[in-house]
Image: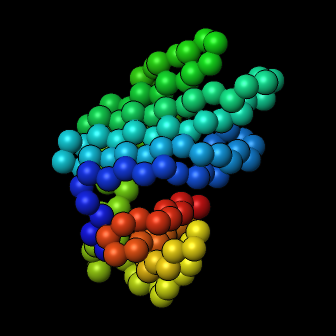
């Protein structure tokens, strides 16, 4: 599949990036031509009663995290996390580094499952309905 350079969608996420399991809803937007990406997640934080908005913005070679709540913070990420823009979907259109694995049903939608061929421990798969992503899995 060839995902459009400008793509956005609501997301459901599962992450362990804070050291414990978190799941929830959010939003993903990418503009490959502008080398820009935005990921918003609504997260519950230990010790806080209300969920907060965590937004990551990437523009070119700069990355920013914004945490909402009573004490909102916007900071440039200097030492951890994604540091520059990478197109999340470009690999799927390249037959030299992607492999088709058949059909799958995600949230009631039939999609084609593609895997990134990689020698690292990170596994990336994309289930797409035509050129529209249905599920991106990074483990």
Judge whether residue 120 can be spotted in this image: no
Q: In this picture, is 126 found above or below 84? A: below
In screen coordinates, is 114 left or right of 62? Answer: right
Query: Which residue corresponds to the image point at 37% horizontal and 50% vertical from the top-left?
Result: 8
User: On the image, which quarter does residue 37 sit in?
Assistant: top left
Judge whether residue 40 can be spotted in this image: yes
In screen coordinates, is 61 left or right of 69? Answer: left
User: On the image, which quarter does residue 104 sit in?
Assistant: bottom right
Residue 87, percent from left and from top: 32, 54
Residue 58, percent from left and from top: 35, 36
Q: Which residue lies furthest to the bottom in this view?
A: 102
Q: How many labels does the image show?
A: 0
User: Which colouring convention does the figure follow?
Assistant: rainbow
The quarter of the image holding the N terminus is bottom left
Residue 56, percent from left and from top: 46, 34
Q: Residue furthest front?
A: 108
Q: Residue furthest top?
A: 71
Query: Which residue corresponds to the image point at 18% horizontal and 48% vertical from the top-left?
Result: 33
The quarter of the image holding the C terminus is bottom right
Query: Which residue corresponds to the image point at 49% horizontal and 24% vertical from the top-left?
Result: 66
Query: Which residue corresponds to the image point at 53% horizontal and 16% vertical from the top-left?
Result: 73
Seen from the viewer's position, the closer of residues 94 and 32 is: 32
Q: In this picture, is 11 found above or below 37? A: below
User: On the image, which quarter does residue 99 sit in?
Assistant: bottom left
In screen coordinates, is 50 left or right of 69? Answer: right
Q: In this picture, is 12 found above or below 65? A: below
Residue 114, percent from left and from top: 43, 77
């Amino acid at each position: 599949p060839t995902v459009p350079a400008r793509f956005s969608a609501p997301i459901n996420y599962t992450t362990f990036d804070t050291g414990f399991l978190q799941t929830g809803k959010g939003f993903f937007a990418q503009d490959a031509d502008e080398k820009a990406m935005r990921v918003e997640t609504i997260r519950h934080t230990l010790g806080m009663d209300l969920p907060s908005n965590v937004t990551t913005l990437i523009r070119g070679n700069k990355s920013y995290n914004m945490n909402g709540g009573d004490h909102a913070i916007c900071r440039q990420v200097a030492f951890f996390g994604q540091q520059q823009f990478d197109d999340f979907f470009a690999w799927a259109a390249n037959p030299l580094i992607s492999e088709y694995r058949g059909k799958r049903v995600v949230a009631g939608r039939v999609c084609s499952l593609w895997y990134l061929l990689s020698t690292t421990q990170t596994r990336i798969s994309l289930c797409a309905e035509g050129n529209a992503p249905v599920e991106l899995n990074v483990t």
